[in-house]
Amino acid sequence: MDTTYNGWANWETWNVALWIGNDEGLYQEARRLARRGRTYQDLVAMLYDCGSTETPDGCRWDDPKIDGIEINDMMEELCE
């Protein structure tokens, strides 16, 4: 039985990945950070510095349920 959410660890991880992948500004920033060897936590810090604490769907960028490894892998794939 598949216990993932649309192939992601959970809804929170999927939602963050969805917004990073579908918002041009977030996409470009995630890509820029990944190219510099930075991680999702760096993206979260930048978002908080800009006043954004959650996705438009209400998921906090720093929700402890988010699988940071999955998001970091996704960010690395943006550079390929």
Image: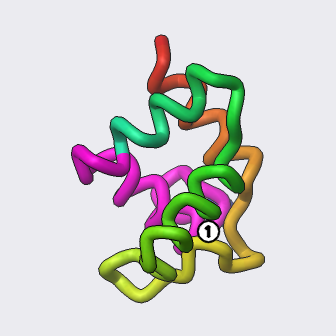
Query: Position of 48 compared to 29: left or right?
Result: right
Give left or right: position of 24 versus 36. Answer: left
Residue located at (40% from left, 75% from top): 55
On the image, the x and y values in percent for residue 31 come to: 46, 31
Q: Position of residue 35 (x, y in %)?
A: 57, 21
Q: Is residue 10 magenta?
A: yes
- Which secondary structure lies at badge 1? loop
- Please give the residue where the numbered disc 1 appears in the rendered image: 10
Q: Is residue 50 positioned above or below 27 on the image?
A: below
Q: Position of residue 10 (x, y in %)?
A: 61, 68
- Magenta stretch, overall SS: helix
For the point 31% across and 79% down, which residue is it? 56
- The residues colored magenta run 4-26
From the viewer's perspective, is residue 4 above or below residue 54? above
Report whether 63 appears left or right of 53: right
Give 13 or 63, whichever is nearer the viewer: 63
Residue 58 location in percent, x, y? 42, 88
In this view, the residue in front, 67 or 62, is: 62
Of 37 and 22, nearer the camera is 37
Residue for point 70% across, 25% down: 37
